Image (spheres, coloured by chain):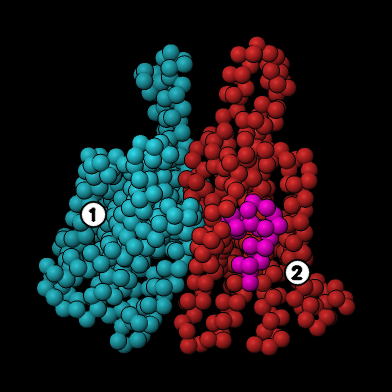
Amino acid sequence: MSLRAAAGQAGGTLALLVGAFLLCALFVVASGKDPVAALTVLLGYTLGTANGFLEVVVRSIPLMLAGLGVVIAFRANTYNVGADGQVIVGAIVAVAATRGFEAPGWIALPFFLGAALAGGAAYGGIVGWLKARYNASEIIVTIMLNYIAVQLLAWVTRGPLQEQMHIFPRSDAIPGGALLGILIPGSRVHWGLVIAIAATLVVYAVMRFSSFGFQVKAVGENRAAARYGGIDDRLMIVLVMALSGGLAGLAGGVEIAGVFGRLEDNFAPGVGVTAIAVALLARLNPLMVPVTALLFGVLAVGTGAIQRQLGIPFPLVWIIEGVVILTFLLIGHLRARRLAAAPETGT
Amino acid sequence: MDQIFFVGLFAGMFRLAMPILYAALGETVAQRSGVLNVGIEGIMLVGAFLAVAGAVWTGSPLAGVGLAVLGGMALAAIHAYLSITLRIDQILSGIGLIVLGLGLSGFGYRLTIGAQKAPQVPTMAKLDLGALSRLDFFGPVFFNHPALIYLGLLAALLLWWFLYRTAWGLEIRAIGEHPAAADSAGVDVARIRYAAVLFGGAMAGLGGAYLSVVALGGFVEDMVAGRGFIAIACVVFGRWNPLGVLLAALFFGMADAAQIRLQALNPDIPYQFFVMMPYALAVLFLVFFAGRAQLPAALAQPFFAGRARRRRDERAGGEGTRLQQKERRS
């Protein structure tokens, strides 16, 4: 691409970003508050204070894991909108499987996290199977399963898994051996961060270098062509959804083991949807997922801060996420158009 | 389970089916024209909020509904621009719309109505159709509903007639099946798709408005609770035919009405399982009705107008279609 075209694209991208920014600022103004003050508080707390930044890191861990799952699914052109449900089911399975179970850490923790991964994988795999076998839209099925999982969690934390005291909708504490210890003393940042980074590298390596990764991409680009080329596209869809759900389930398990220490009702609201934004912003590149996850962690923690300090309603975070998704789609479109136009204009 | 139970069940079926029906009918038209809008959940949420806001501010529920329709069209316009003009992935654009709608409705609510103390939301009265309404069983079940319910049923019939018995309907269906063919026949694919998507947004807004102004008489955050997605499922079950969609929506209305009552009848069973029912049913239906689905062939595929025409014209050396001549003249 010539310098002029590159500059034009950068200019267009910048214009879009500025536009998105101003749009969000508009909503802040609509709430009667000063957008500059809001931005100052948002960035100041999340990036300026140690507390704030460490909180951002904690929040971004499940987003990294779930985001990786979404990346894999989207690469195969299966729209896994069900990470929310898979996170929940993963957590439920892990807590249920280790109930009353006392074992040393090196057994309990892998078992706990493995159960979480298995639970999420099963919940996602069903969707993949339904799509492969019955051509059932994975968008609708995953979203329906989300709502079902929410009800399941509500029941389980008030019923079979509820704490002995039967006061709150939550379970008893999970076995001590299954807990993820604190990584950075004085903060809530736990060893789940290491798991998330490790998962990032593994997913990247698999997608980039393994034949499985190749098949995933092939099915995503052109399912019929992949099948013609000898790839079992139906199996791939099931595996992709299972893997995607498994990572989301792992996110749920990590949240329980690292942050809550017990199963709680409504413990991770909106992680699944945000994970989609994380994946899209990372342009479906696994290595970028931790970066975009941190970004959305900043957004989540920051909007919480501006709600507390300035009284701006929290749903602003969803507005910003929606604007981010749409802006990103626009930027992506701009890039595609520039690339297509270049040869014709001869620049 | 006596007469009162069944009366309540069937009357409830109509009431609970309405928001899904409106959204599903709108989505049927949009999908028939070839555009997939998964964001109607977000549009319904915004519609629900705007309807309550409008009703409280003006004192008229109808004004609220009107505001919801306009809001729905505005949001749908964003999706239409991204999907039709820019040809961006329709599913991703729809997902963005869901999140945006969730944020706009929650944010708007907390800033306005939510900040006041339990405002009185003017709702729509049930119609009194004289002797019909006082019939023993059929009265409350069929003849004692708010006007919006009858409007919804009528809309289903009208849309069926529109899609299958008018030239416009034929154009829409043609665009959804084979836009290139329609394009070379001089049909303005983009403009009709825009109209279809905007209509879908208006109907989704109406569905959300029904939920808040007619059904509940208030706004609760995330009150749509997945009905937008169930509506999309209804479009599939109804085979993209408004009458089929009506049946599907009534079915879900029945399932919803039943689960509420079953909760009361079975206090030993945790109520969460009954709440799960409609969602589980949607999945089951997708599985059992999937095989024979005849979806619009060009659904969710971006259309590049003019390509086929230009290629054909270059080869033939002809003067082109009416649209091309118009373009050349302007």
Q: Quadrant of residue A222?
A: top left
Residue B181: x and y, percent? 65, 30
Query: In the picture shown, does residue A178 fall above or below A323?
Result: below
Which quarter of the figure has residue A156?
A: bottom left
Instruction: Indicate the amino acid at tag 1.
Output: Ala
Image position of A271 with respect to A228: above or below: below
Label 1, secondary structure: give it: helix
Most common secondary structure along the magenta stretch: helix
Q: Residue at x 75, y 69 (%)?
A: B146
The chain to which mark 1 is attached is A
Q: Residue at x 52, y 43 (%)?
A: B90
> Can residue A194 be seen in the rendering of this structure?
yes
Number of numbered tags placed on the structure image = 2
Q: Position of residue A183 (x, y in %)?
A: 16, 61
* Residue at horizontal 74 percent and vertical 61 percent from the top: B153
| Left or right relative to B305: residue A305 | left
Query: Which stretch appears magenta?
Result: B233-254
Q: Nearer the viewer, residue B146 or B242?
A: B242
